[in-house]
Image (cartoon, rainbow, N blue to C red):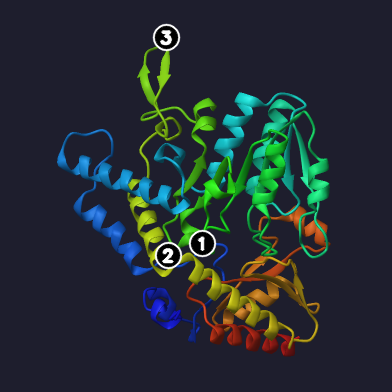
Amino acid sequence: MYDVNKLREDFPILSRTIYNKPLVYFDNGATTQKPRVVVDAMVNEYYSVNANVHRGVHFLSMRATELHEESREVVRNFLNARSTNEIIFTRGTTESVNLLAYSFGEAFMKEGDEVIVSVMEHHSNIVPWQLLRDRKGIVIKVIPMNDRGELLLDEYEKLFSPRTKLVSVVHVSNVLGTINPVKQMIEIAHKHDVPVFVDGAQAVPHMPVDVQALDADFYAFSGHKVYGPTGVGVLYGKENWLDKLPPYQGGGEMIGSVSFERTTYNELPYKFEAGTPDYVGTTALACALRYVSAIGMDAIGNWEHELTQYALRRFEEIGDIRVFGNAAERGGVLSFQVGNIHHFDLGTLLDRLGIAVRTGHHCAQPLMQRLGIEGTARASFGLYNTKEEVDALIAGIERVRKMF
C-alpha cells in the first residue's frame, strides 16, 4: 500500500500554514519539497567532511571525493547508464542543454544544418539552439502537435533531411503533462542516423527512466525537481558521443596538462566539469534518488496517475473550466483556466487560501501561442500530494469563482 500520509511526515514544510491555512503545495513542476534526509545529508557533509574534491591527499578531501563519485554511481544506476563516464554533473537541465548546444554545435554543426525540436519545449530547450543559430546559422525545425497535445509523428518524420544533425525533445511537457513517445521518436531519428537529446526534467521525478532501453544519446534532468537540492543536475551522454565533443567550459579539473602553448583535456566525465563541483549537492542528489528508489518509481507514478485522474473527475464538476492537454499518455500536470478569470488573479487568490499553484506561460511561450492563450494556472503533483488536497483546490477554485 502507498502510505502517502506516512511519506508526508518526511517533509517538514508540508506541516506549516500559509495565511493561517494548511499549506497545499501544487507547484512541484517548478520545484519539489525536500525530505528531511536530503537536508540532513547536506548538513552532515558540511559539518563532517567538507573539503574540495579530487585535489587533496588529506582525509577530508579524499572522503569528500569518495562521496562525490559514489553519487555519480547512484545516478548511473538510477538511469541505468552503462558507465559513470556517461554521467556529467551540471547545475541543472538548463545548463545541460546549453552544454550540449555549445559542444555539439561546435563539433558537428555548420551553417544550414538543422536541429529538430517540438512545439511544446521549455524555453531552456529553445533559446540555446537559437543562440547557436545566431552564432553559426543553423536551422531550427519544429514538430507540430494536435489539439489533444500530442506530437504528430508523421509530421515529425517529414522534418528529417540530409542536413538534420540532432533531435532535441522534451520527455514530459511541463504545461500539458503529455508523455511523449520518446523511444519511438529515437528509433525514427536513428533510422536517419541522427542522435537524440531528451529533456527529462519533468519525467525523472515521476516514472522509471532507463536510458539504455530508450537508446537515448543524451538525457538530462534537474536535482531540485526530484526532491533533491537546487543547483545540481545531470547530463547523460553515450560515451562515444561525449568522447567526440569539445569541452563546454575551461578551468580547473577539466584539464590534463596546461602550458601557454598547449592544453590537453581530462578524461570523461571530468572534461565537462570545469571548476569546483557542487560536491555537497551531488551527495544530496544521490540521497534524493535513493529516497525515491526506496519508495519505488512505479509506485510513485501509479499514485500520481490515480491523483491526476481523481483531479480530472473533480474538475468536471466545475462549470466553465478549461483544461489544456488531453493526451492519451499524460503525467500529473493540470494547466487550466476558469471562466474569464485571469490566471494571475486566480493564483493570487488561491494563495490566500494556502494553495500554491503556478501561473503564467510556464517558460513555454511558443506553446501558449499554439494554444492561443497568454497563460494558465497550473497544478502539478508530487509523491506527497493527497486527494484531500485536490478537494481543497476544487473548493478554492469554486470560492474564487463566486468572488468573480
**Residue count near mark 1 (Cα–Cα under 10 Å), binned few <14, some 14–19, many ≥20:** many
Q: Work out how far the residue at label 2 is from the one at label 3, CA to CA, in angstroms.
A: 48 Å
- The residue located at (81%, 40%) in the rendering is 159
Residue type for callout 1? Pro
- Helix or strand or loop: what does disc 3 sit on? loop
Q: Give the residue number, with chain letter if any, for mark 2.
A: 292
**Going 36% across and 74% down the picture, which residue do you hit?**
10
Which residue is pictured at 73% across the width and 35% down the height?
192
* Horizontal relation, residue 351 to residue 398: left or right: left
Q: Residues within 10 Å of mark 3 (few under 14, many from 20)?
A: few
Q: Residues within 10 Å of mark 2 (few under 14, many from 20)?
A: some
Identify the residue position indicated by label 1 in the image: 205
- Which disc, if any, is residue 79? none
Disc 3 marks a residue whose amino acid type is Glu
Provide the secondary structure element on which disc 1 rests.
loop
From the viewer's side, name the closer residue of 66 and 328. 328
Q: Position of residue 292 (x, y in %)?
A: 42, 65
Q: Earlier in the sequence, mark 2 or mark 3?
A: 3
Assess whether mark 2 and mark 1 are in contact (beta carbons under 8 angstroms): yes
View extreme (top): residue: 261
* Spot occupied by residue 235 in the image (x, y as percentages of width and height): 50, 43
Query: Would you name the residue on which mark 3 appears?
Result: 261
Q: Quadrant of the N terminus?
A: bottom left
